[in-house]
Image (cartoon, coloured by chain):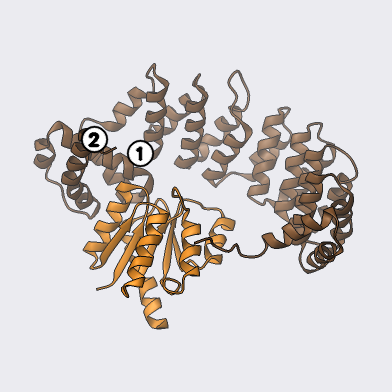
Chain colours: A brown, B orange
Amino acid sequence: MNGPRARTRARAEAEVRPILFGVLDGDAIDPRILDRLTPSRRRALDALARDLLPNVRGPDKEMLVGLLGGAGGAVESARRDSRSSRASVRLRAGGFLAEAGSDSAIHDLLALLHDHNPQVRWSAARGLGRLGDPAAISPLLASLEGARPLPVDVVADAIFEIRTCPVSLLRQGLRSRSVATRAVTVELLGRFQSLAAADDVLGLLQHDPSVEVRARAARCLGRMGTPRTIGPLLACLDDGPVALRVQAIWALGEIGADESVPALRAILLDGAHRMAEAAALALLATGAFGVQVLTQIACDGGSSADLARDALASAEPEPHLN
Amino acid sequence: MKTVLVVDDDDALRELILWKLTKGGYATLSAADGEAGLAAATAAATAGVAPDLILVDWMMPKMTGIELCQALRDNPLTSPVPIILLTANRQDAEIERGFEVGVDDYVLKPFNPKELLGRVRAVLARAEARA
């Protein structure tokens, strides 16, 4: 890190930094200054501009892209690199195109969604999220299927980042034959807290053949916080896969109604460790009545008491170790 | 002249913020991670010249921005210093967590450096009005 090369680079960066920051301050830049830069200074300037791209927005970002594009066309170069035979080059190019946000970026990133390298595909999905263009939503959903499918959470994160997803499109996704598409759409409905879709999600919780979809539906209902879904969530606690029951327990805690407390108490006292642990935290989340029950269990002793104490302690601010 | 301590592990961004603050008429201190930021703030405060404001990045190695804010608030010497958190995290729960540990304001990344300077001025003005 402190070798001669690093020192040379640091020197070059220190020299070009005022030029770059001046541009961000609105200084008009004399093209002759850029033309006179040595190749190493030019590289340092480009590297600094690239490093700053993810952190600035609006006109500042445009200025940086202009600076990069004006000197040999960094965007065009990245577009070429996105078709390189080396995955690391495609990965870097995709990241840059997403940050630069040029007009062509969406097309280049959509192409990278089908790359044979998974890291490039994931990065392209994240890049599409950062671009924020709703036109990427359908292709992102489609990328859940096919020979090189993207993971559910990668797609959900990307679409969530876009922020403006039509609920109608998501509700349509709930009826898809694809488990992954149903999982992503139910996940997003929860994150967007789309109450209009609560009945559809309830239907998935009760009848979907996939445990993953049902578990995500339970989580979604917890995020929506609709009290009328308490009954169906309580029904999930009786039997079924642990993954579903743990999510239903969490959801009941989030909805925070006193009527869930007896069932959560019973699980804390008699359930398997993972469920009991979730029940303790859910009791804490339900509010005053849940805390009262937790405190009682903590005082009574036994194995459940430890979990109750842990849950109560998690509500306390953590002391800092100096 | 007011002093602002900037704690950010991103060299390019830290330098940009320092540049902007200097041009805006502030004296600056800087640190490249949470531990160094805590040490710098504590040392300055112990010497009786606590920074007037601390800008803290959320995601940092060794000690996160939230952990740093908590540590600053736990120390009577640094607890009154206003803190602005820089974060790319847009989730409400995470932002609430920042306010829970005593952050005065936050700036979402990507940001406009001019806007950041405006926030610094506003938080310092509020702190001055409180004093």
The foreground one among A197 and A264 is A264
Which residue occupies 32% across, 53% down? B14
Which residue occupies 56% across, 36% down? A137
Q: Secondary structure at mark 2?
A: loop
Q: Residue B98: give x, y in percent of width and height.
A: 52, 61
Whether residue A107 is visible: yes
Mark 2 and mark 1 on one chain: yes
Q: Are marks 2 and 1 in contact (CB under 8 Å)?
A: no
Q: Which amino acid, mark 2? A: Gly
Q: Which amino acid, mark 1? A: Ala
Q: Is residue A95 above or below residue B11?
A: above
Which residue occupies 35% across, 62% down? B40
Q: Considering the image in quadrants, where does the N terminus of chain A appear? A: top left
Q: Is residue A24 above or below residue A92?
A: below
Q: Secondary structure at mark 1?
A: helix
Residue at image mark 1: A100
Q: Left or right: A149 with respect to A258?
A: left
